[in-house]
Amino acid sequence: MVNKLRDADHAWNENYCADSFSVLSALVASSRGRSPIYLPNLNGIRFIAAAMVFLDHVEWTKQMGGQPSYNSSAFMSNNGALGVSLFFVLSGFLITYLLIVEKGRAGVISVRDFYVRRMLRIWPLYFLTVLLAFFILPWFISIPGWDVSFTGPNFWVRLLLFVGMVPNLAYVCYPLVPFAAQLWTVGVEEQFYLVWPFVCRSSTRRLPVVMLAILLAAVTARTLCYQANAHWGGPFWQAAANFAWCFRVQCMAIGGLAAWLVHYGNARVLGVLFDRRLQVAMLVLAVGVHLFSANFFGSLQIEVMSVIFALIILDAAANPATLVRLEYGPLPYLGRISYGIYVYQILAIRVSFLVIDRWVGFANPVHRFGSMYVVSALLTVGLAAVSYHFLERPFLRLKAGFSVVPSAP
């Protein structure tokens, strides 16, 4: 009986490796051809990340307004930190995979075209948000405890940092800018993009070594900044510790390593990564940590959770038998407009709260709680959809002229 079970398991593993090899062959073949690239389920994952940050911002806005908040729960406190980590891992995965494919198709990576594509994707909405946050919205709406005005502290310095694409530095050194503070993550990504095409162009085969070096350097730098802040204190070391926490290039490097495995990994490696038991373990671990512990992995929480996210993303994008099925209903569309969902959500949440307080009220706390989430979500998605179709999409169409690897819809 034991021998039969062993033989059955061996046969199943052989078939699984064969399926993995077929997927790998198809991916590599498509990367060498001229067909557009589309990796399934990733838009849905992108929306999940945006939704996690949305939940965090709703509770945070309630707290800033002096209303009861659930920020003390592990689930709510994890939403923001894990949501942006998931964003970073997914971004590193996609950018690295497309650069590897571009090098395979064209023989070289065009750094100029890469920068143009990133500018067309990120800059229109980014600079619109900066314009609104610094010069227009402060005349009409505010967030308690926040200030940005011509006479406010360090107005022009903060504006210069945002315009110079280092909002993450403004985030840790100066008072937060209402309705634009969330752009710190965009700054981290832009700084990653500044060097990553050069890294991928030099030697894609050696990328794992580079990614592991980035991971080690990031963890070491954060640890040293934390220790220095604990020992010496002061505004400089406090800002350095906060900056090290925000500067999550290691998350993008981990995502890039997953992309490298999809493209260069052999069938046996993919067979292990696609194993149903590993899938279940990663999903259970991700959900369990999210629900119950904001510090389950201690000082390495960001890095360990990023590895878990990377394995889930790898499986969702390249495994034909993945448990992550997000190509249904509105999820793909919500993922496509997720940049706007992320950028506009603080404004939408604040407006929704003011509307409910002023014109609706809802003395019943259950009704009030539900209305806050429903109205905020609807307004956020509405703003993001309008932005996507009328602001972002015209620029996205221009990307085709600078793309060796077009993206399929």
Image: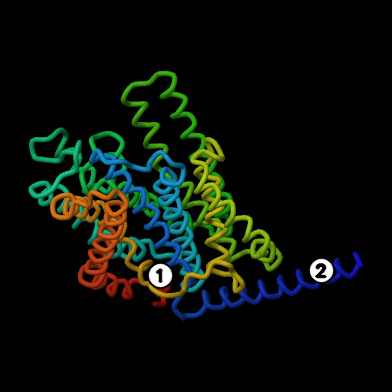
Residue at x 89%, y 70% (from the top left corner): 4
Residue at x 29%, y 71% (from the top left corner): 396
Q: What SS does tag 2 mark?
A: helix
Towards the viewer: 402 or 269: 269
Q: Is residue 378 visible?
A: yes
Residue at x 13%, y 48% (from the top left corner): 141
Q: Quadrant of residue 399?
A: bottom left
Residue at x 30%, y 51% (from the top left corner): 369
Residue farthest to the front?
364
Q: What kind of residue is marked 1?
A: Leu
Residue picked out by circle 2: 10
Horizontal and vertical percent position of residue 89: 47, 54
Q: Is residue 283 above or below residue 299?
A: below
Horizontal and vertical percent position of residue 357: 17, 49
Q: Quadrant of residue 13?
A: bottom right
Q: Is residue 227 above or below residue 377?
A: above
Disc 1 + disc 2, Cβ < 8 Å: no
Q: Is residue 310 above or below residue 109?
A: above
